[in-house]
Amino acid sequence: MIRILLLCWLLACTLTPNTALANYQITPAADWVAPAKLPPLVAETIPTEQLSDGTYYRLLEDQIQVPGDNPNAVSHYIRYVMHATNQSGVENISQLNLDYDPSYQRIELNHLRVIRDGQVIDKISTAQLKVLQRETEAEQLIYDGTQTLNIIVDDVRPGDSLDYAFTRIGRNPIYQGRFSYSAQLDWSVPVAEQYIRIDWQKPQPLHIQQNNGDAQINVTDTANGKEYSLYITSPDMQRYDSQTPLWHDPYHMVFFSEFNRWQEVVDWALPMYQQALSTGDDITAIAEQIRQQHPTLPAQIGAALKYTQDEIRYLGLEMGSNSHLPTPAQETLQNRYGDCKDKTVLLISILRALGVEAHPALVNTQLDKGLAETSPSSARFNHVLVTLEHDGERYWLDPTTSYQTGSLLALSEPDFGYALIVKPSQNTLTSMHKPVERIHRDITERYELPNAKEPLALFSVQSIFSDADAISKRQELATTALQTLQENYTNYYQDYFAGTQHTRLPQVREHPQKGAIEVTEFYQIDDFWSDEENGQTAYFYADDIQNAIYQPDTKTRISPLYLQHPYNVNYTIEVKLNERDWYFNNSKSSIDNPYFSLASQVRFSSNTLTLTYQFRSKTDHVPVAEMPAYLDAREQLLDATQYGIRQAYSHVNEAEQDNFLLLGYAVIGYCILALVVITAFVTLWRVEAGKRPTFSEQRYYPVSTVKFCLYSLLTFNIFPFYWCYKNWQYIKQQHNEAVMPIARGFFAWLWYYPLYLRFYQEGKELGTQQYLPPKWLAALFAILVVVLHIATSLDFYGTVFYLVWPLLWLPLVNYTAHINQRNDSLPYYSRWRVRQVLLAVVLLPILTLGLAQDIGLTANVAVVSGDKVWQHDKRFMLRHGVLNQNEQLLYFYSDAAWNIRDDGNGITEQGVFSYYRDQGQLQVERADFGDIVNVHTEFANQDDGYTTIDIERADGSSFRLILSSEEKGDNKFVQALQTRWRQPLAQ
């Protein structure tokens, strides 16, 4: 029925002649108006480069008369003078729309003129005037009855100025004669002059507040009261960037208000809402039904809210006083429609029937928290909510919201910055902000990757929306066909994977107790991998998090940047890898700054890569000065919320050479070279021995410590034996003692301390014993020489002992060098001979290879314990499925010439494995102990041979392990296998 009545009313408004519809007349301005003088236009002063739409505002004039005897008969005189600099300006100024509410206002058109070349042309008689009923908010289901006097001005040309003035008479009686007015004093476009005048005739004081400026306001006493005026010439231009928070208002504002305190606004609004409340039988019945269906009070409150949201459709008939006056609750219930005021009153009535105290809360959805910066006024609000307290916490409910479910504790609460609660004795605004720990979005993406030869991947997205995000998602699902939504979703993901296609429509599931909604999407990706030069790649993005910290349209800003807050997101990406040649480092990281926090984790287990992200917003804006820091933080977030994987191409290099053949040639060549060098060494040594000079003052065999150390290492620690032999030879010759220098040199590690005592005894005679260490230290060194000589044959520490052993001889070497520093023997024996250099060059590759093998840089000649294998090599084995995640490697042997990644055999706590590279392709064999049915071992016949172990699996397949018998490492390997396999080994 209401639709028919509304339609009839609209048709009547449309079909009625303008004279009946219009409350306007053409008349000169009233006597109380004192028009501002229009300065002459100087073309050179027009800031053409700053103009928008070719329009220059020469004058903005507002004059208001507030009579004392009839406060609702407020007259507002408005005058604009606009200059058109081009055709765009002509289009802008040649059509005017003057709005008014005919239920309490009328329009007086005072003058309409075109100023051309200094001449004033009256346009009232030639202009087309027409009253329109536009209802500009009809799409939002709001009808306020506003009419528009549409004026089309004829013959307007570039270079003309349009000067028009009108008076709007009347004020909404809902304000009960209480006056308020606000004006903007600077603009985003050039304005030449602005004049504001208020003729105040009421006895009550008029309160004035200015924000973002301090213009001079002249106050003059008049016969009827006071006059307030201000005149501004060329006010400053202001602008603000896009993506600016609603509450940020950079403009200079002036507020005139009869209200001085927010308590006065409450006193104005309270009676309207109190008289509209009802506890009639119908409302009581609704409350009783809710009470029976929902046992807890939070659930009852949620149900009452949902009733007013779903059962009472939104429709605003806000003509005249209805703009602020709520409809009685009982009438709204009968009509089954209402606007925010009506729904608020009905919800409060139901809540009171449930025993819950609730109150209206006036808010401004545009000013947001900027409301707190304005002066008190009944005209500051454009929306009303319901507020209540439960268990000591305040809640805010919006009965005009749709698609909301859940109990009070799960409801999405609006936050418009500040609200004025309409209840007795309320004298301040109340902040609506409250910490929100709720997760707005919990998203899980699941991928099942294809095998190497299969391009098809499966992909699903499970999204759980809560709070305001759940409301938005329900609205989207309710207003858009599911098929259309699916197509939109598919197009979105095709930006990431071009071959994405959905396999079925989304599944939707409600979580009513939590107020959440779950949507699951299903896709297949026809071409998952992106080809690159050395392999195929794919990237994963936590895009809902990336979108929260967005790239602003303007980076160099003059106003703060808006951020969605609160906004909390959990994002999980699970990637199931169908092949086992993968390895990823488990890691955790975090980002924390004034704008957001992000915790990230990478986990790899059971052939599944899991990426988790927890995003928490911290603020609703970024100050201008912090934009560089924000952009840096955004780059960090983008890096942290994307993850790439790569797989190498599998192909055979036909040009690959036979490495073993080349190695064989290299070994033969090296042996020939070594034989030649050794022959040359012996020959040159004999030649040099025959020409070696004698030094009368020489004592013992002096050599520099540097040469001693280097030559010892390069000769595999043979030189200390030779040096010891030469010193005992000197002792035998000088003292004619029956010693055997060759034997003592051969067993030099046993004759360390006796040689020290010879040096010490002679040093006492010569006074040089101070250059020797004390006896206790020499004895310690002698013990270490013996111990380290034996320890060099040990498996792990042999290399370390090999490097340290020559250093223990340095105290004795240094002594012989010191006592011979004044004769020529020291420089002679310290000099590097050609034969020594040649020998060092030949032996250096062997030394390097041995050290590399001992520390695990290259393949070792013997079986080694698992802890000697480098971590990067273990990661290689993990990537290629040789090892499982967290699997302990016990023993390992590689028969490769250099790189253990070309060949390897090993045993772990779980099984055995073997791998080798065949024409560039890595071949991997592996068997867990539970899969092995038979093992056959054939030990080597000699200590430097090879032991083979044949492994037979339960499925009948088999493979072979090859182990070196060096250092009896094969025995350790076999023993480990015996203790872990369920059967004894077959010999």
Image (cartoon, rainbow, N blue to C red):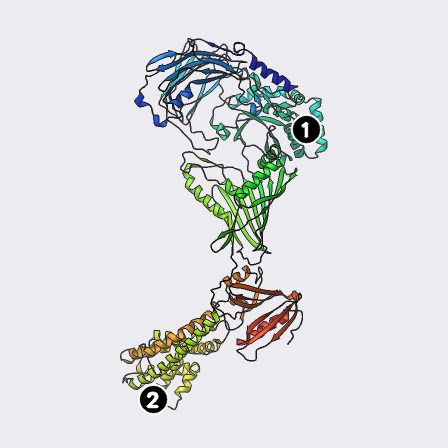
Quarter of the rendering containing residue 387: top right
Tell me residue 805's x, y (percent). Answer: 42, 75
Judging by the rendered image, the residue that carries numbered circle 2 is: 733
Q: Could you say where residue 453 lies in the image, as x and y percent from the top left?
A: 57, 55
The relative height of residue 368 versus residue 953 in the rendered view (above or below) is above
- The answer to whether residue 194 is visible is no
Q: Is residue 260 visible?
A: yes
Q: Which residue is mark 1?
A: 354
Q: Amino acid at mark 2?
A: Gln
Question: What kind of element bears circle 1?
Answer: loop
The tag on residue 451 is: none
Contact? badges 1 and 2 (CB < 8 Å): no
Quote the CA–CA distance across marks 1 and 2.
120 Å
Q: Quadrant of the C terminus?
A: bottom right
- Residue 889 x %, y %: 56, 65
Q: Is residue 608 above or below residue 327?
A: below
Three-letter amino acid code at the position of disc 1: Leu
Q: Where does residue 553 sit, x and y in percent of width and height? A: 44, 36
The foreground one among 975 and 838 is 838
